[in-house]
Image (spheres, rainbow, N blue to C red):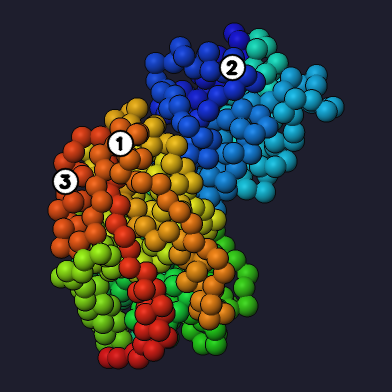
Amino acid sequence: MKASDVFVNCLENEGVTRIFGVPGEENADFMISLEDSEQIDFILTRHEQGAAFMAEIHGRLTGEPGICLGTLGPGATNLITGVADSNMDCAPMVVLTGQADSKRQHKESHQAMDVVSMFRPVTKWAQSILHPDNIPEVVRKAFKLAVAEKPGACHIELAENIAESDTDTSPIPFQKVRRAVPADKIVDSAFDLIANAKRPIILAGNGTIRKRASVQLRKFVEKTGIGVVSTFMAKGCVDMDSEQCLYTVGLQAKDHATCALDAADVVICLGYDIVEYHPYLWNHDKDHKLIHIDFTPAEVDENYRVDVEVVGDLAHTLWMLNERIDALDVAPKFDVKYQAAARRDMKADLEEYKDDDAVGSIKPQKALWDARQVMGPNDIVLSDVGAHKMWIARHYHSHEPNTCLIPNGFCSMGFALPGAISAAMVYPDRRILAICGDAGFLMNVQDMETAHRHNTNITVMVWEDHAYGLIKWKQENHFGKHTDLDFGNPDFMKLADAFGWQGVYCDKSSELAAALERSFQTEGPSLVVIPIDYRENNLLTARLGNIACSI
């Protein structure tokens, strides 16, 4: 059998149903073989970076590897930003690239470069297929590693002469990856530290929205009353309406949630990676006792000195803790007044501008309040990267896991538009809202055509400020001034029309909710553009710097 046919059979064996990408000459054999697959759809994108972001969102929403494809040389280099984003944010992905005939790889040759070495720093594993008989092993290993904790990206390179070779191999049977569970003794140590604490608190990270962990976490906080502060990526691990939801941390400034963290004597870090919110920001004085509970051991850091380390499947560990609570005659009682105060004060902040009726520009707080009102509990918001991300992180909260997707590790702009296309393909019956700055939106604007071609039901809300707003905000905070960061924009309504999208420009706060609602009731993609009032950025900075903790 032709090697490229075997490769496709191996992908089918792994359950692949969708590949995003831009093919080239060197993976032509693979593409012709893929044409015969009744299981796998190829989604042709307008740029490889968009394909990688689409694969990332598929991985984040399904827990199964998203697949993206590019050719050698520039196709591979275009993929790498999205691949790195996926890997650092623990989204399972397998990236496929073509390569030159092995007879010319040793010398200067058209588009030839060492793609595998380029991908190694931003993947869990990168490998070229050196012989057609190795295809089943390489594919099985890539998929196995991609979903093993912590999930991430794996890369497979297939040279054109290997793809067109013959082989008599067949796929290696799929086998689900199992995760180890912690020993009873170490869970007992963690439970004793929690039970004897006065003011414990949970710092929930990315891991809590994976592998059934949220279900067990919700049971745990209901039994104990312990509050949960989440990182940007852990939104929805507990319901925003739960009394134990203390909202988010991560703005690198004092906020209501950090007041609750400061008051805690024991911090239970669940599925937490220090890249999400560095411990020197919340444990600078190293005065908290720390329990690290995660799939993998804790990162070594001066401000993350762990007292008890529980390594194993997070959902199972939480189940073990719940079993120990149920075995007690009397459940432990904790002092939660600082947590209740943090929730009360933050909730008041969220509601402050819900009735704002400004005309000419719209406050970030109002835009996000209205977005939350038109989105259902299971609908999905995707945030691009920019000043709006900071507002989404603080002001948009979730009822369910994986319903607010924010890039936070690699933190790449251009994420939300292609990500929204993929989210709509995974969940065609849900409302999908991408929120972008005008800078990030235009970085992958070409995939507006992909959304139109597939009649994707998404809404993209662009916050227009004609500038790199987040950089301006940070420079002003640090230096008291900013460099030239302003730029011009196209007429977004004409742009929407050119790509076959519905376009709405809204500069009246009182009309935004209705404009968003209409966009979701219209078939196909919609663009909603609002002039954003980023005068609120520096006002927020001043406010956070002067927050006084209350009880």
- Considering only vertical position in the picture, is 535 above or below 453? below
Q: Which numbered disc flags the more N-terminal residue, 1 or 2?
A: 2
Residue that carries the numbered disc 1 in the rendered image? 497
Residue that carries the numbered disc 3 in the rendered image? 518
Determine the residue positioned at 42% across, 64% down.
Answer: 387
Amino acid type shown at disc 1: Asp
**Mark 3 neighbour density, 10 Å: few (under 14) some (14–19) many (20 or more):** few
**Residue 439 placement, left or right of 339:** right
- Considering only vertical position in the picture, is 546 above or below 38? below
User: Percent position (x, y) of residue 537?
Assistant: 39, 73
Tag 3 secondary structure:
helix
Quarter placement of the N terminus: top right
Determine the residue positioned at 38% across, 37% down.
Answer: 448
Tag 2 secondary structure:
helix
Q: Is residue 459 at least partly visible in the picture?
A: no
**Residue 305 placement, left or right of 177:** right
**Residue 389 placement, left or right of 380:** right
Tag 1 secondary structure:
helix
User: Percent position (x, y) of residue 536?
Assistant: 35, 74
Q: Nearer the viewer, residue 379 or 140?
A: 379
User: Percent position (x, y) of residue 450?
Assistant: 39, 32
Q: Which mark is residue 28?
A: 2
Nearer to us of marks 1 and 2 is 1
Amino acid type shown at disc 2: Ala
**Residue 478 placement, left or right of 394:** right
Amino acid type shown at disc 3: Arg
How far apart are the alpha carbons under marks 2 and 3?
43 Å
User: Percent position (x, y) of residue 48?
Assistant: 53, 35
Determine the residue positioned at 80% across, 21% down.
Answer: 104
Which residue sits furthest right?
107
Quarter placement of the C terminus: bottom left
How far apart are the alpha carbons under marks 3 and 1?
17 Å
